[in-house]
Amino acid sequence: MYWEKIFGLITSGMYLLGSVLVFIIILWNKDFSVLLIVTSVTGFLIGLGYIFVFLKNRDTK
């Protein structure tokens, strides 16, 4: 149970880092595809969603 949470937090951190890097690239280059926004928002929501679920479950136990 312990390692699953650690690996989940690491993975969600990678999602967040990747999404932030894509957002920086979008802001840096004015010519970008809409698909970049969709994938970066999705990764950002997955990363934050896991962290919020993890913190919510940790507080209830």
Image: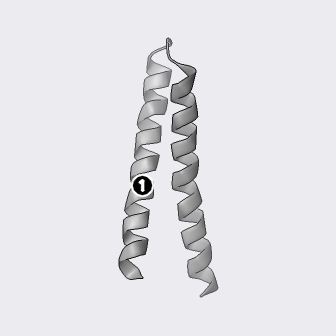
The quadrant of the image that shows the N terminus is bottom left
Nearer to us in this view, 25 or 5:
5
Indicate the position of residue 13 as horizontal and vertical percent values. 42, 55
Q: Residue at x 45, y 29 (%)?
A: 24
Q: Above or below — where is 58 with respect to 6?
A: below
Q: Which residue is mark 1?
A: 13
Q: Tell whether 20 sits left or right of 48.
A: left
Q: Callout 1, which amino acid? A: Gly
Q: Quadrant of residue 41?
A: top right
As helix, strand or loop, the secondary structure at mark 1 comes to helix
Taking the spot 58% from the left edge, 33% from the top edge, the residue there is 38
The answer to whether residue 12 is left or right of residue 61 is left
Residue 57 vertical position relative to residue 15 in the rendered view, above or below: below
Above or below 9: residue 32: above
The location of residue 19, given as percent across then percent down, is: 47, 40
* Residue at the spot 60% in from the left edge and 81% down from the top edge: 59
> In the image, is 2 to the left or to the right of 27?
left
Q: Residues within 10 Å of mark 1 (few under 14, many from 20)?
A: some
Picture quadrant where residue 17 is located: top left
